[in-house]
Image (cartoon, coloured by chain):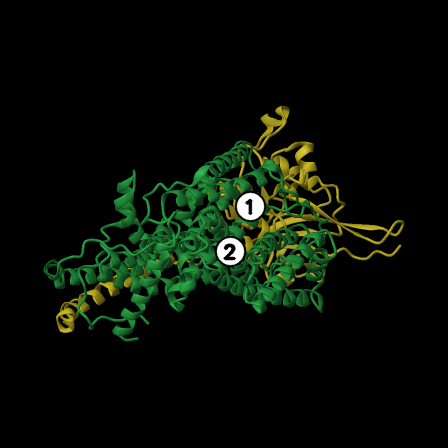
């Protein structure tokens, strides 16, 4: 695309943003500064959620005190499942994170303007759910302190957990944070001018954003490349979770090449579904009907329709494989799920997914007129997502022993339910506090003091060269550290099961991955005055 | 402008490449060196591959091995409540397989220690290297490093790994009988059979003191389960030594290993029960 085209595109975008800002009298940076007045409902919700999170904390304290004897988990083979609700919700929380960055990337890469007002709430959903996923992993560990100390020190690349903890929590979360931070600078600059207190926080976030054309230009380019790079990371991240189960040959029901792709698609289903619910709730609560148009929900609804139908197809393929001429052990698990102890859950999953599919398909045919139905579909697929993960994690442990052990049972206790509910509450609480302190819908582009042409020239050429050098340096250092850290952790040429050559080299790998994504911020923060026309690479 | 930008880059290129090469060289050297050192230090010494043979024809199902194992390895006694809730710990377990209906009922007892697989799924999945295959083929567990994620317990097809759901406890009267040679495990870690490697170490020390090498006779009844088996159904030894008793028995036509089709290459060999006609 030519430079002329880019400018047109930017103009269109800023027009849109101006419209957006005008239509949000109550909740936009242009109207009043943070903290925003959100009424009594906000305080009630926050108090209730804090109480629930506190209860979750108490439940976890009980587990720390007595050990995981207070959960419903037991020994495999002796009649139980050693992984239970925690792992189910690790998968769920990390799955939900799919939506945010995908939507952000779609907005940027395909230029879908209708979804633009949803970008920040979607990204926030990603970040919050990833944090909750990480906390849920910690909740599952028998020794959380040792986990936090030993994972960075000894992490082995041969374990699928390596990917979960380095790529998901290190790379994916950090990249999302960088994306979120950069996309929020303009609004932060706005808030810094109008905030009643905590101005320094907004000023820090804005980090010198002046709203010049050059800055917007850079952000446009940076967000394109970040979105492009985050997409494969997203597929990798959800796949590592699937591979935790999919590559276990000794556990019927898990050993399945469809596991990783299935996890990616199911992540999309539940993430998109939850985003629909969250967006509808925020739209209703903040009266953003004019900003978040029905067309936005139509986009999300159609996205969910495609993902749901793909997942239904996966389920058919799975059931056919597990029943037609499968190994007796596979057949046993499949039978137990469809007709046995787990039949209730299984048919709820099938019912919810089919119902959601029917609703969304009807919406698609009728042009998506009913928001309530789309939200209902969003809720249904999330019920299905939780239960389907349960059906992946638990039955293969209770009924999936190849040796003649008696089948087991698993029933979560109040501690597990409490911790998971507490995590849900904590996540929602963070979300609500954020809405109070920051515009959840991207507001107007910040029109700061226009820099004089003379000043721009002064830091023009030299500044740009320093910026380019800094960016290249960060990116190369990141790549170098990532490769070195991985090789030192992996011992690629000797035995992969041995310890890292140098202790803490997994940290080097994670730092390298982080630095690669941080280079985007470096590039954007070093934006100088206006760029000369031409001579710069234009985004596609 | 492009010329001005490219000049310093051109100037930097050789040094950067040199630096990269040096770095890669250093990394490669670090990776290769210890192995070579190790190989030269070991010389031509043959490493043993410890294994076990369990003759199901001799096994009476008395569970003496299970009791001996508990006592030897300080396996916590979690009491009837927790055992009833399927949280008991059994390094040596007794698998029972029922065939037929009463009165033509037969039960096969299979004592099941850890199989110490050569290609152990539990070793592959451990995220922190708390479990590893030792140089003598024992799948060992480092309690201090284990973070309690329980991935190994789900990965083991034989369910031979046990998680400490709570802090270990013993009845007051038995505490003075805890074995000082074996560390007790805290809550939140996974534990498992070690082939009584502490006894192996003691036997090796003894042989060294007597200025001779370890013989098959030293080890064939070495683990607590083997020592205690009244029927002599359990034998221990070096599968790498073609003349050891376990090696010879492993070649028997009655020999099989559990779930061989998984490709885990267990080092516990079972001898099939003969069919008796009466």
Mark 2 vs mark 1, CA separation in Å:
25 Å
From this view, report whether residue A127 is shown above or below residue A366: above
Percent x, y of residue A71? 60, 39
* Position of residue B80 in the picture relative to residue A227 (left or right): right
Residue B47 in view: no
Q: Give A383 or A510, whichever is nearer the viewer.
A: A383
Please name the residue that numbered disc 1 is placed on.
A86
Please name the residue that numbered disc 2 is placed on.
A276
SS state under label 2: helix
From this view, report whether residue B69 is shown above or below residue A274: above
Give the green chain's letter: A
Residue A387 in view: yes
Give the yellow chain's letter: B
**Residue at 82% over, 51% down:** B106
Percent x, y of residue B116? 58, 52
Q: Quadrant of residue A37?
A: top left
Q: Give B72 or A56, whichever is nearer the viewer.
A: A56
**Residue at 71% over, 65% down:** A323
Q: Chain of mark 1?
A: A
Q: Are labels 2 and 1 on one chain?
A: yes
Q: Chain of mark 2?
A: A
């Amino acid at each position: 695309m030519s430079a002329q085209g880019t400018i047109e595109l930017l103009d269109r975008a800023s027009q849109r943003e101006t419209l957006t800002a005008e239509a949000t009298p109550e909740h936009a940076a242009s109207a009043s500064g943070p903290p925003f007045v959100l009424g009594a409902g906000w305080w009630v919700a926050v108090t209730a959620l804090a109480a629930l999170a506190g209860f979750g904390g108490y439940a976890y304290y009980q587990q720390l005190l007595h050990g995981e004897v207070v959960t419903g988990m037991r020994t495999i083979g002796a009649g139980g499942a050693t992984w239970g609700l925690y792992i189910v919700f690790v998968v769920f929380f990390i799955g939900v994170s799919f939506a945010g960055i995908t939507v952000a990337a779609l907005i940027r890469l395909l230029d879908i303007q209708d979804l633009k007002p949803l970008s920040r709430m979607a990204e926030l959903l990603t970040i919050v759910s990833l944090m909750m996923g990480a906390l849920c992993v910690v909740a599952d560990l028998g020794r959380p302190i040792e986990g936090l100390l030993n994972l960075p020190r000894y992490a082995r690349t041969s374990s699928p957990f390596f990917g979960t903890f380095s790529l998901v929590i290190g790379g994916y979360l950090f990249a999302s944070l960088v994306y979120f931070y950069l996309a929020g600078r303009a609004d932060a600059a706005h808030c810094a001018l109008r905030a009643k207190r905590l101005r320094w926080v907004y000023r820090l976030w804005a980090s010198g954003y002046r709203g010049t054309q050059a800055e917007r230009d850079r952000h446009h380019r940076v967000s394109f490349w970040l979105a492009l790079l985050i997409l494969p990371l997203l597929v990798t991240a959800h796949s590592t979770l699937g591979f935790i189960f999919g590559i276990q040959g000794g556990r019927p029901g898990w050993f399945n090449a469809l596991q990783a792709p299935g996890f990616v698609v199911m992540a999309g289903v539940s993430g998109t579904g939850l985003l629909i619910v969250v967006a509808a709730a925020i739209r209703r609560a903040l009266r953003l009907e004019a900003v978040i148009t029905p067309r936005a929900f139509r986009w999300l609804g159609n996205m969910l329709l495609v993902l749901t139908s793909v997942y239904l197809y996966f389920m058919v393929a799975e059931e056919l494989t597990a029943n037609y001429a499968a190994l007796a052990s596979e057949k046993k698990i499949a039978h137990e799920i469809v007709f046995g102890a787990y039949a209730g859950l299984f048919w709820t999953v099938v019912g919810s997914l089919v119902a959601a599919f029917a609703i969304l398909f009807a919406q698609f045919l009728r042009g998506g007129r009913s928001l309530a139905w789309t939200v209902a579909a969003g809720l249904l697929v999330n019920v299905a997502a939780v239960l389907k993960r349960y059906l992946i994690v638990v039955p293969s442990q209770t009924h999936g022993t190849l040796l003649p052990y008696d089948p087991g049972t698993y029933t979560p206790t109040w501690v597990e339910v409490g911790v998971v509910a507490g995590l849900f509450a904590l996540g929602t609480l963070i979300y609500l506090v954020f809405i109070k302190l920051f515009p959840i819908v991207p507001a107007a582009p910040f029109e700061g003091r226009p820099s004089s042409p003379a000043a721009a020239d002064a830091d023009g050429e030299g500044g740009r060269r320093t910026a380019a050098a800094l960016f290249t340096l960060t990116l190369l250092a990141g790549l170098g550290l990532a490769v070195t850290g991985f090789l030192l952790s992996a011992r690629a040429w000797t035995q992969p099961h041995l310890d890292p050559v140098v202790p803490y080299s997994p940290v080097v790998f994670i730092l390298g991955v982080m630095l690669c994504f941080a280079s985007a911020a470096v590039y954007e923060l070093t934006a100088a005055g206006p760029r000369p026309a031409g001579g710069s690479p234009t985004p596609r | 402008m492009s010329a001005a930008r490219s000049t310093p880059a051109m100037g930097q290129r050789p040094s950067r490449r040199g630096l990269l090469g040096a770095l890669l060289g250093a990394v490669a050297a670090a990776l290769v060196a210890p192995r070579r050192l190790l190989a030269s230090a070991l010389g031509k010494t043959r490493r043993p591959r410890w294994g076990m043979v369990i003759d199901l024809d001799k096994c009476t199902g008395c569970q003496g091995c299970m009791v001996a194992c508990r006592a030897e390895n300080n396996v916590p006694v979690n009491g009837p409540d927790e055992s009833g809730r399927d949280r008991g710990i059994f390094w040596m377990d007794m698998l029972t397989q029922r065939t037929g209906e009463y009165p033509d009922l037969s039960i096969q007892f299979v004592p099941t220690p850890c199989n110490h697989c050569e290609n152990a799924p539990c070793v592959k999945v451990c995220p922190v290297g708390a479990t590893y295959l030792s140089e003598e083929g024992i799948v060992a567990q480092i309690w201090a490093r284990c973070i309690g994620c329980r991935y190994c317990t789900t990965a083991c097809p034989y369910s031979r790994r046990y998680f400490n759901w709570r802090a270990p406890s013993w009845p007051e009267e038995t505490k003075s009988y805890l074995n000082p040679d074996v560390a007790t495990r805290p809550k939140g870690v996974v534990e498992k059979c070690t082939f009584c490697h502490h006894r192996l170490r003691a036997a090796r020390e003894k042989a060294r003191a007597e200025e001779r090498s370890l013989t098959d006779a030293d080890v064939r009844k070495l683990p607590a389960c083997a020592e205690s088996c009244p029927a002599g159904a359990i034998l221990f030894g070096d599968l790498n030594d073609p003349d050891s008793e376990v090696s010879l028995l492993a070649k028997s036509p009655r020999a099989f290993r559990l779930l061989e089709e998984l490709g885990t290459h267990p080092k516990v060999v079972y001898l099939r029960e003969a069919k008796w006609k009466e």
